[in-house]
Amino acid sequence: MKITKTKLFTLLIAITMVSCYQQERKCTDFKTGKFEFTQEIDGKTQTSTFERTDSLQIETYNGKTDTASVRWVNDCEFILQKTHPKNMQEKKAITMKILSTKDKTYTFEYSFVGDAKTQKGTVTKIN
């Protein structure tokens, strides 16, 4: 198969454009505020709301409120640690990484600190 100069040029432009693409990450817009997180658990949509300051996150889910300390690692990553854990599982810190932002939402990845298994979610800022 013969590659013409036009095809080669088009291919190089396409590769350059793809390699330069970066998702928007305005993480500082989401450091503080009131947020909503919706996820599906056992086929049912569950929603929690939380308010985050520079150092605390207070979350309400199913009528129960939990507080966690927030320690920012950098502008897009932080660690949550429950302030009043009720069991060993709740004592484990959670690492959160904002992957991308758009308008009033951010997509994030989270896992227990030291655990390779991660999950993803999307949060909406509501104030």
Image (cartoon, rainbow, N blue to C red):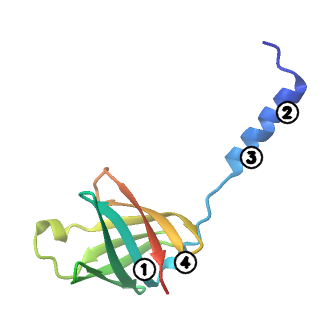
* Of callouts 1 and 3, the N-terminal one: 3
Which quadrant does the N terminus fall into? top right
Residue linked to disc 1: 35
Q: What is the x, y in percent for residue 16?
A: 75, 43
Between 127 and 95, the residue placed more toward the observer is 127
* Residue 94 quadrant: bottom left
* Of callouts 3 and 2, the N-terminal one: 2
- Residues tagged 4 and 1 counted as in contact (Cβ below 8 A): no
Q: What is the x, y in percent for residue 47?
A: 33, 73
- Residues tagged 1 and 3 counted as in contact (Cβ below 8 A): no
Q: Residue at x 35, y 71 (%)?
A: 79
Mark 4: which secondary structure? helix
Residue linked to disc 4: 28
How far apart are the two marked residues, 1 and 2, measured between alpha carbons? 46 Å
* Of callouts 1 and 2, the N-terminal one: 2
Residue linked to disc 3: 17
Q: Amino acid at mark 4?
A: Thr
Q: Amino acid at mark 3?
A: Met
* Tag in front: 4 or 1: 1
The single residue placed furthest to the top in the displayed view is: 1
Mark 3: which secondary structure? helix
Mark drawn on residue 9 = 2
Q: Amino acid at mark 1?
A: Phe
* Of callouts 2 and 4, the N-terminal one: 2
* Tag in front: 1 or 2: 1
